[in-house]
Amino acid sequence: MNSLYYQKRLSRNIGDKFFTSLSVICALIAILPLIFLVTYILIKGGSQITPELFKLEPNPPGDDLDAGGINPALIGTLIITTIASIIAIPVGVGGGIYLAEYSKGGAFSRFIRFGVNVLAGVPSIIAGVFIYALIVSTKILFGSMYSGLAGGMALSILMLPTVIKTTDEGLKLVPNELRYASLGVGASMYTTILKVTLPSAFRSIATGVVLGIARAAGETAPLIFTALFSYYYITGFGDLFYEMGSLAVLIYNFALEPYDAQNKLAWAASFILVLSILSVNIFSRILAAFTEKTKRV
Amino acid sequence: MEEKLTLFKNRKRFGIEKNIDIIFKNTALVLSSFVAIILLGIILVVFFQSFESFSRYGLKFLVTSEWNPVKDEYGAFTAIYGTLVTSFLSLLITIPLGVGTAIFITEDFVPKVVREIIGSFVELLAAIPSVVLGLWAIFVMEPFFRAFFVFLHNFFGWIPLFSTEPTGRNSLLAILILVVMLLPIVTSIARDSLNQVPKKLRNAAYGIGASRWKTIFSVILPAALSGIMAGVLLALGRAMGETMAVTMIIGNSNAFSWSLLSPGYTISSMLANQFGEADGSQVSSLFYAAFVLMILSLVVNIFAQWLVKKFSLKY
C-alpha cells in the first residue's frame, strides 16, 4: 500500500533531486557570465558615451588625459564589413544556389559542402595570415601594404561559409512544387531561381547573412595584421589602400594601454559594438520566430 | 497541321535565353568552387611560406621552446603546449556545465518560456565578440579571481600546476575565458541533439519504472551521445583557434612552465603578437606555427564531421 505513494527517502528520489539541482546550478553558471558581462559593458561603456566620441579622432596614447573619440574606427568598421559583404554575399549566394538548385548530390557537391564546414572551422587568425601572405606582403594592391581592402578580404573569408550554408539551407526549404510549377509553365531554370525560389527563401537567407555580417563586425584577429589601425579620419576613396582602424582593433589596442583614458575609450567602443551586435541578433530572432508562426497558418 | 508546327517552332526558347541559362549555371558552379579554391589556397600558401623554417628545423621545431629572434633560433613547444593545455582543460570544465545546462533546457523542470529565454540567452553569449570578452577578462575577471589564485598557490602549491606565484595575467585566466566562449557552442549543440531523441524512448523508460535521471543517464544521453561528441569536437577546434580573448589575458610569455598560474602562450596568441613586427626567418617560423595550428584544427574539424555522419541518429 505504502509503495503507491511518493517516498522522499527512497534513494532514487534523493538521487533525482540531487541531479536536478545540479543541472539547475549548471544553467545558472552558464547564464551568469552573460548577465554580468552585458550589464557591466552597458554601465561601464554607456557612461563613456558622449557626442564628441562620434566626432573626434582618438589621440595617440600618452600622458594627456583626453583620449578623443572613435570616429575613424566606427567608420572603418562599417567600411571593412561592407567590403567583406560585397565579396562574400555574391560568391556565397551563388555557391549556395549551385549546391541547392543544380547539384545532384554527386562527389563535387559533397566535397564543396564538406569544404564549407571545414572553412567554417578554420581559425580566424589563419584567414589573416593567409591574406597577409597573399596581399599585404606581396603589395599586390597597387603597392599598398596594410589596407582596409585587405582587411575586408580577410573578413570575407570568414563570412563566406555562413552565407553559403544559409543560402543552401534556405533554398532547400522551398517546396519543390513551386519549382515544378514554374518550370511547367515554361520558365527557364535561371528565371525559376531568380523569380521564384530565391524570393521565397529571401527572408531566411537574409537573416543568416545579417547574422554573419554581425559576427564579422566583431572579428579582430583577421584585422590586426591586414587592416592594422589608424588614428586619422577617413576622408576619401583613396584611404581604402591605407591602414584603417576598426572598433575591434581599437578595443584590442587600447585595452592593453596602461592609460586610463584609452581604457575608457575601449569600453565605449565595446558598448557600441556589443549593443549593435546584440540588437541585430535579437531582432533577427524575433523576425525568424514571427515568420515561422505566419508560415504555419 | 502545317500551321500547328510553325506555332510550335515559334514557341521554342530563344537562343539568347538558352545561353543566359547556361551562363547562370556555370557562374554558380564557379562561385561554389571558390570555397575549395580558398581552402586549398590557405593550406598551400601557409605551407609554402613555412617551407624555409620547416627545412631548417624540421620536426625539432615542435619540441624545442627557444624563441629568439636575435639568435635566429625558433621552436614552438611552449605555444603548442599552451594551445593544447588551455583548450583541453577549458573543454574539461565546459562539457559538464554545457551538457548540464542543455539537460536543464530540454527537461521540464521550469515552464517552457523560462527555458526558451535561458536558451536564447546562452546563444546570445556566442554573439559577443571575443575582443570584448578579453577586455572584460582584463578589467573584471582578473581582479575578481586574484585572491582565489593566491589561495590556490598557497594551499596547492606543491602541485606543479599551481607552483608559481600568481602575478596578473596567466594561463588559468585564459582557460576560464575560454569556458565562457565554449559554453554556448556545447550547450546549443547538446540541446539540439537531446531534442532529437524521440519521445518514444523516454516514454518507454518511464513506462518500465525508471526515474527521471535514470532515464536521462541510461537512455537519453547515450542516444544523443554522437551529437554531443561532435559539438564537443567543434568546441575544441574553436578553442584551439581562439585568438583575441586568450591573447589579451594569457600574459604572452614564451618561457615554458608547468604552472597554470604563470603567463603562457598559445600559437594563435603568438601569431597575433609577433606577426606585425616580424621579419626574416621569424616570419617563416610564424607561418610554420600557423601551419601546425591549421593542421590541428583541420584534424579536429574533419573528425567531428566524420563523427556526425557516422553516428547520426537513425530513429
Image: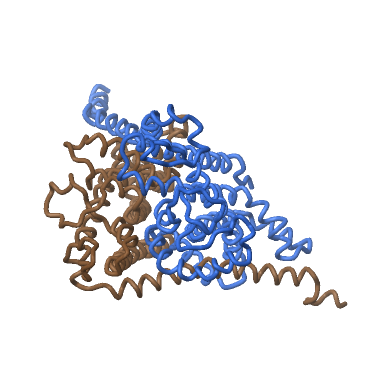
* Residue at x 36% of width, y 38% of height: B282
Nearer-the-camera pick, A222 or A1:
A222
Image: B230 above or below B63:
below
Q: Is residue A102 visible?
A: no
- The foreground one among B230 and A134 is A134
Residue shown at 55% from the left, 47% from the top:
B233
Quadrant location of residue B97? bottom right
The quadrant in which residue B26 appears is top left
In the image, is A152 to the left or to the right of A52? Answer: right
The residue at 18%/44% (across/down) is A241
Quarter of the picture holding the N terminus of chain B:
top left
Who's blue, chain-wise?
Answer: B
**A36 to the left or right of B190:** left
Relative image position of residue A45 (x, y in whole percent): 32, 71
Please state the horizontal and vertical placement of residue A287, each as a whole percent of the image: 37, 62
Chain whose colour in the figure is brown: A
Residue at point 53%, 45% (across, down) = B81
Q: Is residue A267 at least partly visible in the picture? A: yes
Left or right: B88, with A16 as reference point? left
